[in-house]
Amino acid sequence: MDKSFKKSNRDADLALVRRAKRGDYAAFDLLVLKFQSRIINLAVKYVKDSHLAEDIAQESFIKAYKSLESFREESSFYTWLYRITANTAKNYLTSKSRRKEYSESEVLSLDKEDSDILDIPGGDSPEDILAANNLRQIIHNSLNDLPEDIRTTISLREFEGLTYEQISEVTGCPVGTVRSRIFRGREEIQKKIAPSLNHLTERKKAKEKIL
Amino acid sequence: MTEGIKERISALIDGELSEFEVRRVLEEIESDPELKEYWSKLHISRDGMKDHSLGFFNNDISKRVAAELGKAVVDNSETKKLFSKSNFYMASSIIVGMVLVATTVMVSTSESTLSPEEAFASEASEKIAQAIASPEALDVLGRSVTGMNATLEGMDTDSKGQIYANYKMPKDGKTFRVSLSLLSSSVPELRPSNSSKLTYLKTKEGVFLISVSGNISSETKSQILRNANFTPIKLK
C-alpha cells in the first residue's frame, strides 16, 4: 500500500439521519437497531441494571428523535446520541436520588467518547458475557478465514474507515468490486455466526419464559 | 430476500448509497421484516469485529421506541406524517402513469400529423412504461450518483417517455439532471444539449440512453456515467 489515507470523516449514518429528519421513521428505526446494543451497554454502566438500562436507552432514542432538528451534523450521529444517553442516565440518577454506582470521577471518565472504555463486554450474567465472547471469537475467526482479497477489502473498510472510493484507489479495483467484496465478506461471516446467533436467541427466549 | 437488496443494505451500512438508493432500500426494508433482521445481524458481526460490546445484542427495544414515537407522531403532526410516508414505488407508478397519459393524449389528439418523436412515443409508450418502471432501470438512476452526496430534488418524466432526476450538490449548490430513456430501432434523432454527456445501456428491458446535464464539471458528469459502469461519450 503506497498511499496513505486519513480515515473518512464522513458519517456513514448521515443519509439515514437526513431521511429521519424529514420524518421517515424507517430510517430512524434502522439507527435504533444499529445502536441499541451499544446504547444499552452505555446506560448499564450508569444504572447497573439491564432492565433499567433498556428504559434509559429507550428514553434516549425518543429524545434523539424528537430533537433531530437540533442535530447539526457537527459530530457523528453516534457521538450526539451518546451524549443524550449519558445525560439521560445522569439525570435519572439525580432525579431519583438513587445511590450512585460510580464516584464522581468515574462518571466523568465515562463521559469520554473512548470506545475502549465504553465497549467492554456487557450482559446481565457471567454466562451472557461468556456467550458474547464466544460469538466475538467466531466473528474474528470467520474474518481470518476469508480469502485474502476479501479480507483486505473488508479490513480497509472496517478498521481503517476508508470509503469505497479510497479502497478502490488503494487496491486498484473498481468501486463496484470493492462493494461486492465487502458484501461477500459480510455474507460469509453471517453464515458462520448464524448457528451461534440462533442458539443465543433461543436461549434468551427460554430464559424470558422462565422469568 | 435477494442478493441485490442484501448488497445494497451492506452499502447502506457504509454510507455508500445515493439518496435515491437509500429511499428505495428503506422502502424495501420497511416491507420485509427479514431485511430488517439482516440489517441487525450485519451490525452484530461488525460490532464483534471491532470489539464493541456484544453483551446486549439480543435486547431489542426498537418496537418499544417505535410505539412511543408512533403515538407522538400521530398526535403532533398528522399532515407531516402523510407527506413523510413517501413511497418510492408509488412515485414510480405515478411517473409511469404520466408517461402513459402523455403518450395517449398525443396519439388521440394528433394521430394524423405525428412528428417522428411523437410517433416514437406512441409506438413505444407501453414498452417505455414497463421498462422504466423496472427496478433495473431505476437502479441505473440511483447508482449513477453513488458517493456524490447529491440531494435528490425531484423526479419527473416528459412526453417522450424520458424519466429524469434532478439533483443538487449541497456543497456548492450546483444542480444537474440525470435522464434515462428507452431507445428502440425507430428512435428519432435525439439532440441533448452540448453540455450533456451520454451513454447507452443495453439490458434485457431494452437499450437505454442515459445523459447527464447541468452546471457541474465535465469530470463529474463522466464520473456519474462511470458510476453506472458505462463509458461516457461526449457529444459534439
Image: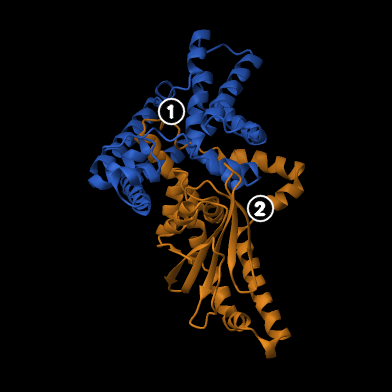
> Badge 1: how crowded within 10 Å, few (<14), some, or many (20+)?
many
At 54% from the left and 27% from the top, the residue drawn is A82
Tell me, yes or no, whether dots 1 and 2 are on the same chain. no
Is A106 left or right of B89, judged from the image as shown? left
Instruction: Depth check: give the residue in front, A5 or A127.
Output: A5
Measured as percent of width and height from the top left, residue B235 is found at 48, 66
Element type at marker 1? Answer: loop
Question: Chain in blue?
Answer: A
**A114 over B86 or under it: above or below:** above
What amino acid is at disc 1? Gly
At 41% from the left and 30% from the top, the residue drawn is B53
Indicate which disc residue A208 carries. none
At 48% from the left and 82% from the top, the residue drawn is B185
Instruction: Depth check: give the residue in front, A35 or B56.
Output: A35
Visual hue assigned to chain B: orange
Q: Label 2 belongs to which residue?
A: B85
Indicate the quadrant where residue A96 lies: top right
Q: On what subunit does the disc labeled 2 rest?
A: B
Give the residue at the far bottom of this rendering: B112
